[in-house]
């Protein structure tokens, strides 16, 4: 399986997980010239940006540079999502291991 297909596979697992947990998905794979947001969803009147990382090396690429890309991408597209309606905006990360075990870390930046 290619890296692209693995990424899509893990994003699909995260998508199903979030739905099951009561999140309302409003957009997937938001692209800008700065980067990509994997999943944008709503829960408890919060707009949540979700980054999905899967596989053996899932923890390696989450760093300040990656977070800045996510934030810049969101800021580049935010007018499209009526952010004023939400009480908060947060970033979550979902890590998925090779056995499809999900680790959801909420609100990584406070």
Image (spheres, grey):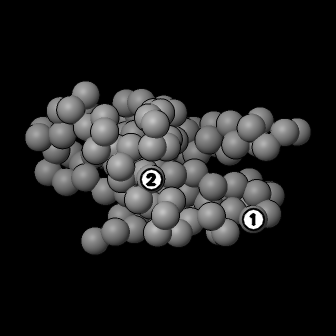
Q: Residue at x 62, y 41 (%)?
A: 11
Q: Residue at x 69, y 55 (%)?
A: 54
Q: Residues within 10 Å of mark 1 (few under 14, many from 20)?
A: few
Task: Name, please, the residue furthest toward the right.
Answer: 1
SS at circle 2? helix
> Which quadrant of the rendered structure holds the C terminus?
bottom left
Measured along the vertical axis of the image, is residue 2 above or below residue 67? above
Residue located beneath label 1 in the image: 57
> Which quadrant of the rendered structure holds the N terminus?
top right
Asked if residue 78 lies left or right of residue 40, the reply is left
Measured along the vertical axis of the image, is residue 80 above or below residue 23? above
What number of labels is visible?
Answer: 2
Would residue 37 be visible to someone looking at this image? no
Would residue 108 be visible to someone looking at this image? yes
Q: Position of residue 66 (x, y in %)?
A: 51, 59
Task: Check residue 8 in the rendering and tell me which mark sits there, or answer none.
Answer: none
> Closer to the camera, 73 or 7?
73
Residue located beneath label 2 in the image: 69
Asked if residue 25 lies left or right of residue 20, the reply is left
Q: Position of residue 88 (x, y in %)?
A: 19, 54
Q: Position of residue 60 (x, y in %)?
A: 67, 69
Asked if residue 76 lies left or right of residue 36, the reply is left
Of discs 2 and 1, which sits in the foreground? 2
Q: State how far apart marks 2 and 1 are (Cα).
A: 19 Å
Asked if residue 22 lies left or right of residue 75, the reply is right
SS at circle 1? loop
Q: Residue at x 31, y 35 (%)?
A: 77
């Amino acid at each position: 399986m290619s890296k692209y297909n693995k990424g899509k596979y893990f994003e699909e697992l995260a998508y199903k997980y979030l739905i099951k947990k009561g999140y309302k998905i409003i957009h997937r794979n938001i692209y800008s010239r700065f980067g990509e947001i994997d999943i944008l969803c709503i829960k408890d009147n919060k707009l949540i940006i979700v980054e999905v990382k899967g596989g053996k090396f899932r923890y390696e690429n989450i760093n300040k540079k990656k977070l800045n890309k996510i934030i810049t991408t969101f800021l580049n597209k935010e007018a499209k999502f009526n952010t004023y309606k939400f009480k908060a905006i947060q970033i979550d990360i979902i890590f998925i291991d090779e056995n499809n075990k999900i680790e959801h870390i909420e609100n990584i930046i406070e």
